[in-house]
């Protein structure tokens, strides 16, 4: 078993693929590192004897290795990979949702939860509360700020103007451990 470390000057992981920002890590791993490992260790240098596995970011890298270098590995086990695309990345469909702060429906819009705890309670009501950016008065909704008065509109659940620091409790809200 070989574990590959591929930190970059800018991040702790190169994602094991070629990148315009980071360089040719994918090519270096597959065409330079793997032949060097094969030459220096007792390894069966055949596709049928080589698999790749990983979890989280390693799961993403596992899938990338199978997509970009399909003839190098015979199998892959990707555990809980990072999102492979952005079709529901962090509760937002980057390709299709017209608004990242609200879920738009036929008759109304609902604030999109920014984060959730393990028991299903919302930690912060909306992403706007975390970033501090609020919609204008023309799109004011429950829990949002009015651009003209600066006062928050009241709704079924009033929230604080700024989120509590991580790990602290607010009345009526639970936080992640």
Image (cartoon, rainbow, N blue to C red):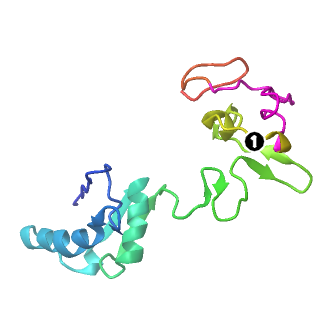
Between 3 and 112, the one nearer to me in the picture: 112
Vertical comparison of 134 with 44: above or below? above
Quadrant of residue 68 in the image? bottom left
Q: Position of residue 134 (x, y in %)?
A: 72, 38
Magenta-tinted stretch: 139-163
Q: Is residue 12 left or right of residue 67?
A: left
Q: How many marks?
A: 1
User: In percent of the image, x 65 and y 25: which residue is there?
Assistant: 174
Vertical comparison of 130 with 78: above or below? above
Q: Position of residue 26 (x, y in %)?
A: 29, 69
Q: Which residue is mark 1?
A: 135
Q: Quadrant of the N terminus?
A: bottom left
Quadrant of residue 128 in the image? top right
Between 22 and 83, the one nearer to me in the picture: 22
| Residue 57 visible at all | yes
| Residue 117 visible at all | no
Q: Residue furthest right?
A: 107
Quadrant of residue 49 in the image? bottom left
Q: Is residue 172 left or right of residue 33?
A: right
Q: Position of residue 121 (x, y in %)?
A: 70, 32
Query: What main secondary structure does the magenta stretch of the protein show?
Result: loop
Secondary structure beneath dot 1 equals loop
User: In percent of the image, x 84 and y 35: which residue is there?
Assistant: 142
Q: Is residue 77 left or right of residue 123?
A: left
Vertical comparison of 156 with 138: above or below? above
Between 79 and 168, the one nearer to me in the picture: 168
Residue 8 belongs to the span the image colors magenta: no
Q: Position of residue 51 (x, y in %)?
A: 32, 70
Q: Residues within 10 Å of mark 1 (few under 14, many from 20)?
A: some
User: In percent of the image, x 71 and y 24: which residue is there?
Assistant: 160
């Amino acid at each position: 078993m070989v574990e590959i470390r591929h930190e970059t000057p800018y991040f702790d992981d190169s994602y094991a693929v070629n990148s315009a920002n980071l360089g040719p890590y994918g090519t270096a791993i597959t065409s330079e590192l793997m032949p060097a490992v094969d030459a220096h260790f007792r390894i069966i240098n055949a596709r049928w004897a080589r698999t790749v596995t990983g979890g989280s970011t390693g799961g993403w890298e596992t899938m990338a290795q199978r997509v970009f270098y399909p003839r190098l590995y015979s199998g892959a086990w990707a555990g809980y990979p990072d999102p492979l695309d952005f079709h529901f990345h962090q509760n937002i469909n980057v390709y299709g949702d017209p608004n990242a702060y609200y879920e738009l429906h036929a008759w109304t819009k609902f604030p999109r939860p920014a984060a959730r705890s393990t028991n299903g309670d919302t930690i912060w009501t909306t992403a706007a509360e975390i970033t501090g950016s609020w919609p204008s008065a023309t799109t004011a909704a429950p829990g949002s700020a009015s651009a003209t008065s600066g006062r928050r509109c009241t709704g079924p659940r009033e929230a604080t103007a700024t989120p509590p620091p991580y790990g602290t409790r607010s009345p009526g809200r639970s936080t992640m451990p």
